[in-house]
Amino acid sequence: MWTIAIADDYPVVRNVLGEFFSCFPDLFRVVGEASNGEEAVRLVQEKNPDFLLMDITMPLMDGLVATKILKQQLGYRGLVVTYTGYPKPGLGEMAKKAGAREHFVKPLNLMALKKKIVEEYSLELKDNLKRAI
């Protein structure tokens, strides 16, 4: 089972994502939610989820800054998947440069998101196994 944290400034989006991933209890467990980037950083430090699903556009600290802090400064080893409702050229590349593994544009196709998470985590496990050998 993989643990997931969700960071989005809209409660309805957090609820929809949380309910969706809760439909797959053998695969996922939602361990927490955050409404801004600062909360997301604290949540990841406390819960260390396997995945962080994070909106880019949030108050106090956006998802790009939070991703950069988590991945580049704090060494978070989980996977960050970012998304936004404001498609801006180059935003996906900026998210990946900050440390996100994948970037989506809203409206989210939840089944595609789930599939991508499973694929990315499986790749991460294979890479870690190869390094250990």
Image (cartoon, grey):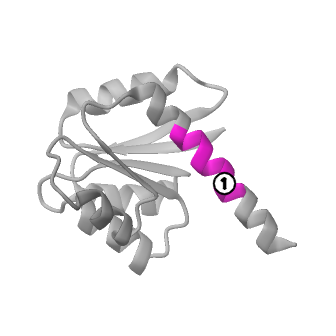
Q: Could you tell me which secondary element the residue under label 1 belongs to?
A: helix
Q: Which residues are magenta?
A: 116-125
- The chief SS type of the magenta part is helix
Residue shown at the point (37%, 30%) measured from the top left? 17
Q: Is residue 79 magenta?
A: no
Q: Residues within 10 Å of mark 1 (few under 14, many from 20)?
A: few
Residue shown at the point (40%, 61%) measured from the top left? 100
Q: Residue type at mark 1: give it.
A: Leu
Disc 1 target residue: 123
Residue 120 is situated, as x and y percent measured from the top left of the image, at 58, 50
Residue shown at the point (37%, 28%) measured from the top left? 109
In the picture as drawn, the residue positioned furthest to the bottom comes out as 73
Q: Is residue 97 above or below residue 108?
A: below
Q: Is residue 78 found left or right of 62 in the rendered image? A: right
Residue shown at the point (14%, 45%) measured from the top left? 86
Q: Is residue 115 above or below residue 74?
A: above
